[in-house]
Amino acid sequence: MLTELTIAAAQGGLRRREFSAEELVGAHVAAIDRLNGRLNAFITVTSEQALDAARRADAILAGGGDAPALTGIPLGIKDLFCTDGVRTTAASRMLEEFVPPYESTVTANLLADGAVFVGKTNLDEFAMGSANITSAFGSVENPWKRAGDAETVLVPGGSSGGSAAAVAARLAMGATGTDTGGSIRQPASYCGIAGIKPTYGRCSRWGTIAFASSLDQAGPMARTVEDCAILLQSMAGFDTRDSTSVDIAVPDYRAACGRSLKGMKVGIPAEYRVAGMPAEIEVAWEQGIAWLRDAGCEIVEVSLPYTKYGLATYYIVAPAECSSNLARYDGVRFGRRVPGASLDELYEATRREGFGAEVRRRILMGTYVLSAGYYDAYYLRAQKVRNLIRKDFENAFQTVDVLLTPTAPSPAFAQGEKMDDPVQMYLNDVFTVPASMAGVPAMSVPAGLSASGLPLGLQVIGRSFDEESVFAAASALERAAGFTHRPAVRAEVV
């Protein structure tokens, strides 16, 4: 089946003319037609545009010249990236009818490399969530099922849950995600795929709807580590329109996959052994350590003493930036407008109807910590702790090349579990937030299955702008795990 191919395999097949881009894209469009009604992975499906683009890709491939790397490859685009002429909602009623007249830099880079977009994937509203249950367009269903339980609906993780579910269910060969505190890595872990948050500044944020500007970073999600390397190669690069974009050369990420790990030093942070962590997460971690040791790595115990403050610090910094970024949605300039008798009433009515409960909660939290009476006590102190977290990583990377940790404290949980307590939901990001606070690259790779048959991910964290070492270690874990990347669902159920 064409939907079973990896991006790397599809690249070769297209160039050998074993199948056409129209056939490849058509197979994925058919899968979307068949499964998206249940999974709700896409908010907007662009079937006709995708098939037109596939026919153009076939003409380029038939020309015999050097076609761009992603020519004819069908991808899903998280509905946080502005796409010229295609509705971009951020999964919010506030932007329900917004059609951008421009293309984000990341998606423009992918289009320039020949990618075909099959649709805009679902997410937590404005990327705020860890389970993809806050979308104004409905929750996303994880295509995986617990062993022996075909009925319980599992969350795909968030906020990039639509992208993760689309890739895992073979609705797209890869997808874009954004990661603020773990929103690529955690859903990748829950859905049994690979996903990388590159170094902050590696991918342009221009044209990507902002949540927390000092944390948001675009990255790829795909079924294999190599496929993520191929996608990041296209997505990354300097952009003068983004003041946080870093002018540094983009290396050959694909070449790093499969590189020898002999002599690589892998740090194991003591602080990630948190109280109450399920035994199967600990077992998977120990297995990952053994695999890297067998690959020639030296295992080194390290300490990141300020890691324990990462989650608390994140939930001060991120809401503060969110409250500032979302102030622009006022019913005046663009987006939803709800009339009021006065300007204040217009603001209130628009934001009350346009924003969901989780977004309103984070705006209120952020406004509170930025207020005159609490700025020094909360926001300023959080920034100081954030700097200490960053220094923890810098100190660790003086002695090791990468760090290995679990990605998430559990496998995917059911819709309805943990949802009454926002704090319990926030704890899903306990292992991913520190790397986001430090701005360093981090990748989740499937490492096996839980006792209930659900995927478990391990996280590889690297030095700033050393994604190559992350890809090298992650690909070694992937080979050792021998993970099939196949959702455990019965055909008649899906």
Image (cartoon, rainbow, N blue to C red):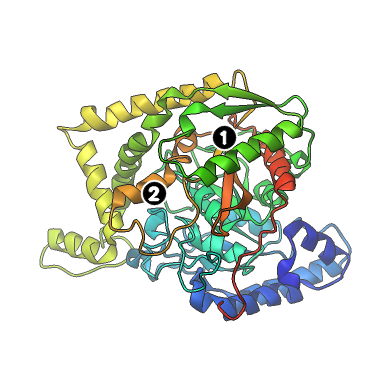
Looking at this view, is 99 or 427 the one in front? 427
Residue 211 - label: 2
Looking at this view, is 396 or 172 the one in front? 396
Picture residue at 70% right of the left edge, 34% below the top = 292
Residue 468 - label: none
Label 2 vs 1, first from the N-terminus: 2
Looking at this view, is 296 or 68 the one in front? 296
Is residue 232 positioned above or below 274 on the image?
below
On the image, the x and y values in percent for residue 472 come to 72, 38
Count of residue discs: 2
Quadrant of the image occupied by residue 152: bottom left
- Can residue 254 be seen here? yes
Mark 2: few/some/many CA within 10 Å (<14, 14-19, 20+): many
Is residue 328 positioned above or below 74 on the image?
above
For the residues marked 2 and 1, what is the alpha-carbon distance in whole angstroms? Answer: 20 Å
- Locate the C terminus by quadrant: bottom right
- Locate the N terminus by quadrant: bottom right
Q: Name the residue under label 1.
A: 246
Q: Relative to residue 433, is residue 136 drawn left or right?
A: left
Q: What's under tag 1, amino acid-wise?
A: Val
Is residue 485 positioned above or below 407 on the image?
below
Q: What's under tag 2, amino acid-wise?
A: Phe
Looking at this view, is 369 or 246 the one in front? 369
Picture residue at 52% right of the left edge, 73% below the top = 150
Picture residue at 74% right of the left edge, 46% below the top = 479
Picture residue at 64% right of the left edge, 73% below the top = 50
On the image, the x and y values in percent for residue 171 come to 62, 69
Q: Which type of secondary structure does the marked residue at label 2 adopt?
A: loop
On the image, the x and y values in percent for residue 63 come to 86, 67
Mark 1: few/some/many CA within 10 Å (<14, 14-19, 20+): some
On the image, the x and y values in percent for residue 432 come to 48, 41
- Can residue 442 be seen here? no
